[in-house]
Image (tube, helix red, strand yellow):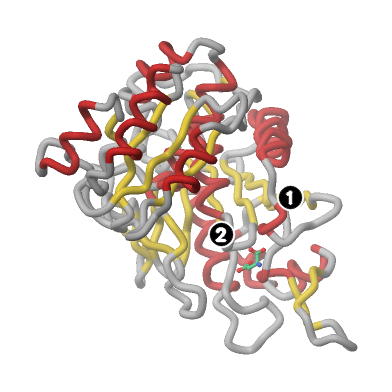
Amino acid sequence: MKKPAVLVIYTGGTIGMKAHPVTGELVPFRFEHVLEEVPELRKFGFQIDTLSFDPIIDSSNIIPDFWIRLALLIEEKYTLYDGFVILHGTDTMSYTASALSFMLKNPEKPVILTGSQLPIGMPRTDGKENFISAVEIAAQKRDDGHAMVPEVCIFFQEKLFRGNRTFKYNAEEFRAFRSPNYPPLAEAGIQIKYNTHAIKYPKKWGQKLEVCTRLGTDVAILKIFPGIEEKTGKALLNIPGLRAVILETYGRGNAPSLDWLLKSLTDAVAKDIIILNITQCPAGSVSMESYACGARLKKAGVLSGLDMTTEAALTKIMLLTGLHSDNKKVRELLTVSLSGEF
Ligand code: ASP
């Protein structure tokens, strides 16, 4: 039997950083050293190939062009491997996972992002366990020979999550990611237990992977807060060329009933700008019917983002506005779950 083949793509992040001898700041080091730190990987007996981005980056520096490079790399190598592991900084890992979940259409192989809170060379690193389990999951097959998890996921601290349901929750603890609105796809204890009911499988296997590489960036995020000024809201809603705004609201999708805000939103909608309502709460869903303060937004033409994360909403809008110049089409597709994101 052919041994499983996994491609590890190293992009940077804490997992591969070390302290600068003079400044003490964490700076990236070369990928060969990351692999040297994890000799355990050889015990799997898999074919594990590696590719490193050049330059490697702190994930705070990620831009949509980087996602395009990553998606094209996966497309290029797709038939050669059973699964892909992307080592990535944690700061924007949920954005990258969300973006890839939309850019890779009809995935039949796992794309698992992971990283760490402590560099892999440190004695108490969380990077080794994350890396080793991610590789094992990327190679895992069902009895029928198809991939166990044909999705873009994040593996972190014993849990495998659907990537577009996650956000970085903790800047210090090892349990850095959460997915409150969707259960883990797998949990790694003594065994890796797969939650097959939650995993998204293709309706029909054998479809070609399609990669969307056009991303629009005429999007902005308006976070509502008590005391928000008219000049602040208006400045953002009047950005030239703006196509969509994520309105981060309170609770079930509520915003203050300020005349200027409702009028500005109504005017923006009249100018064909999409306003998508996403709650500031980490868990739960927007339901603009629940309170008068939400109902007014709905009346102004604001769309519900349901229980999507901001990361998923933003990257979904980027993908849809990249694909379609007509906002009517974008609006229509925003109500469709493309990759299990709501
Ligand atoms: N700043 C780092 C990054 O996102 C943090 C990390 O990797 O955890 O690249």
Q: Earlier in the sequence, mark 2 or mark 1?
A: 1
- For mark 2, give the secondary structure: strand
> Does residue 295 appear in this view?
yes
235 over 211 or under it: above or below: below
Front-most of 318 and 289?
289
Few, some or many C-alpha atoms within 10 Å of disc 2 (few <14, some 14-19, many ≥20)? many
Query: Image check: 229 left or right of 131?
Result: left
> Does residue 342 appear in this view?
no
Q: x and y percent of residue 166 in the render?
A: 41, 53
For the point 16% across and 35% down, the residue is 295
Give me the C-alpha separation between circle 2 and circle 1: 16 Å
For the point 38% across and 66% down, the residue is 188
Q: x and y percent of residue 240 in the render?
A: 62, 27
326 over 177 or under it: above or below: above
Q: Can you tell me whether the CB of the residue at mark 1 lies under 8 Å from the nearest atom of ligand 1?
A: no
Badge number at residue 114: 2
If the picture is divided into quarters, which one holds ligand 1? bottom right
